[in-house]
Image (cartoon, rainbow, N blue to C red):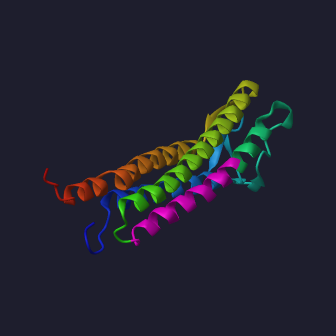
Amino acid sequence: MAKGKGLNIPLLVSGILALIAAIMVILLLCTPVIVDFDHRDNELDYIGLISSCDEDGCRWTCYRASPRNGACNNLMLAKSFSAVSVAFILLFLIAMSAMQFSGRLPSKVLKSVGGGILFLGVLTAIAIVITIIFISQSLRISIERASYSHSIQPGAGFYTAIVGLVCLLVSMGVAGSGFYGSRTKKECANVPATST
């Protein structure tokens, strides 16, 4: 094992990607996931997971969604899983950041800790996927039930969730190479050959 401390470049890149993913997931809670365009007055209504703001002020989630068609229930479930996603991805980000200050760890320790961090990343990805599914369900129901005077479209929050998921998956892939790749190869290269 090499002496001294040094940056693990894959983990550094992974941490940056995890930070971007965390920002995207947090923005998911603060941006509209459904946009309702009313052709009668040419106005847009925005529906978000926490609150929805327009020229009339802020209203809580599902203020335009009818409980009868299930759109509201799906949005409420999406809000719950998005909150879980935020908690998990912040833990993932903190863990990735902590690895940068851990110095040179033995490969066994690095792999063990890395496995736990990647497992946390998998849980985060699952929570984000479920959030996207519930938003998609609410969007589908809203489109099916919309009258001719309304056009329902995905909001910025929907695409934000997808970008966050992609960043997280790439971050996990890069972290995997940092935990299981170059460090182990270097240690194996430093092992002296035994004569027979």
Q: Residue at x 27, y 75 (%)?
A: 4
Quadrant including the N terminus: bottom left
Q: Is 41 in front, or is 13?
A: 13
Is residue 108 placed above or below 44 in the rendered structure?
A: below
Left or right: where 123 falls relative to 12: right
Q: Is 1 in front, or is 174?
A: 1
Left or right: where 173 falls relative to 9: right
Snapshot quadrant of residue 125: top right
Left or right: where 75 falls relative to 166: right
Q: Is residue 39 visible?
A: no
Q: Position of residue 176 (x, y in %)?
A: 40, 50
Q: Residue at x 74, y 44 (%)?
A: 77
Q: Is 178 in front, or is 190?
A: 190
Q: Position of residue 179 (x, y in %)?
A: 38, 55
Snapshot quadrant of residue 106: bottom left
Does the magenta portion include 30?
no
Q: Residue furthest left?
A: 195
Q: Which residues are magenta?
A: 81-102
Q: Residue furthest right?
A: 68
Q: Residue at x 82, y 31 (%)?
A: 69
Q: Main secondary structure of the magenta part?
A: helix
Snapshot quadrant of residue 55: bottom right
Q: Position of residue 178 (x, y in %)?
A: 35, 55
Count of numbered circles in the view = 0
Left or right: where 167 falls relative to 160: left
Is residue 57 placed above or below 163 in the rendered structure?
A: below
